[in-house]
């Protein structure tokens, strides 16, 4: 309570603190906005028939996302995954094996985007499954961050093999996705297995529907008022911290307030206020606890 009162009392300092946090994040997250010829889905014709079969991953997601309304501390509406059952699922292992020999470059561009988003999510899950004995921290909480060590961040560790090449999660996110695609909605679709991440979708991304799937992902994310978007009295707008860390991908605040309203319902007060630039932006505290069945579901304050 004391910390919460202090945070409210010194709320005017938040923009300065956010600026400092963004600067730190900028040293870890490569900028991609100046990379030439990044692609957009609108540049390509829709895919009529998918060439790569993601049905194994699709089945795994449908079977092992066992709760779509999970609660971890103050974060609600989390898609919780049964990692124990998934680790024993032969179809998951078969899908990882299928990706190892995939010829991604031969796929139509929309399929490539769908492929790499699936690859990120599947390899993130695989990394955790293979290291479950290390995921539990000294504080009794499961978190992907517990796999990091001095000079060896989990994001840079080998997560798996795609098309005969070893990839880390950072390789996929920053090189294959952000580095090649000017599609900010990617941030709603890749999930680093944490409570405050956008939810793991209960189906695989496919080239023939990827544009609609990505749009739906953003909409669902923004409907979650504990980790996506929440408008409070007085025009204080809470957003996911992803919008802070990856601010440049959205074109800064001016770009975001143009991009974001398309995913909000007409008549939504937040949509109107964002378009009018009549909000005071704040960010949810990021909860890094793992999106696993059985994670702590106590109700404690998680926002600042």
Image (tube, rainbow, N blue to C red):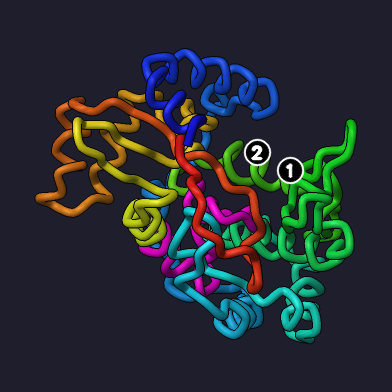
Looking at the image, do the residues carrying marks 2 and 1 touch, with CB atoms under 8 Å apart?
Answer: yes
Q: Residue at x 57, y 56 (%)?
A: 195
Q: Residue at x 57, y 70 (%)?
A: 80
Q: Which residue is mark 1?
A: 171
Q: Residue at x 65, y 72 (%)?
A: 294
Q: Residue at x 54, y 64 (%)?
A: 200
Looking at the image, residue 121 lies above or below residue 249: below
Q: Point out the stretch of residues depicted in magenta.
A: 186-214
Q: Quadrant of residue 243?
A: top left
The disc placed on residue 73 is: none
Task: State how many labels appear.
Answer: 2
Can the viewer see residue 33 in this picture?
yes
Residue 226 x, y percent position in the rendering: 41, 51
- Of 6 and 74, which appears nearest the observer? 6
Residue 86 x, y percent position in the rendering: 73, 79
Residue 208 x, y percent position in the rendering: 44, 69
Residue 202: in magenta span = yes
Mark 2 residue crowding within 10 angstroms, few (<14) / some (14–19) / many (20+): some
């Amino acid at each position: 309570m004391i910390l919460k009162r202090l945070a409210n009392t010194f709320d005017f300092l938040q923009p300065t603190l956010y600026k400092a946090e963004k600067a730190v994040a900028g040293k870890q997250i490569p900028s991609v906005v100046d990379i030439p010829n990044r692609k957009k889905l609108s540049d390509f014709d829709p895919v009529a028939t998918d060439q790569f079969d993601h049905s194994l991953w699709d089945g795994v997601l449908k079977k092992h996302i066992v709760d779509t309304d999970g609660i971890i501390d103050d974060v609600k509406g989390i898609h919780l995954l049964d990692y124990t059952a998934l680790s024993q699922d032969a179809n998951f292992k078969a899908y990882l094996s299928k990706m190892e020999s995939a010829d991604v470059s031969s796929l139509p561009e929309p399929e490539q985007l769908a492929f790499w988003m699936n690859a990120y999510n599947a390899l993130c899950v695989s990394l955790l499954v293979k290291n479950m004995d290390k995921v539990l921290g000294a504080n009794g909480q499961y978190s992907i961050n517990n796999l990091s060590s001095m000079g060896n961040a989990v994001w840079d560790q080998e997560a798996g093999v795609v098309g005969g090449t070893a990839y880390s999660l950072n390789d996929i996110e920053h090189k294959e996705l952000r580095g090649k695609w000017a599609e900010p909605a990617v941030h709603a679709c890749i999930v680093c297995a944490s409570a405050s991440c956008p939810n793991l979708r209960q189906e695989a991304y496919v080239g023939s529907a990827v544009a609609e799937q990505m749009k739906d992902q953003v909409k669902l994310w923004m409907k979650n008022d504990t980790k996506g978007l929440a408008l409070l009295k007085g025009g204080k707008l809470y957003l996911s911290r992803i919008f802070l860390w990856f601010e440049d991908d959205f074109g800064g605040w001016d770009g975001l307030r143009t991009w974001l309203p398309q995913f909000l319902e007409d008549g939504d007060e937040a949509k109107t206020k964002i378009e009018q630039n009549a909000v005071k932006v704040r960010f949810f505290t990021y909860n890094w606890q793992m999106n696993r069945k059985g994670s702590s579901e106590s109700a404690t304050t998680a926002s600042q």
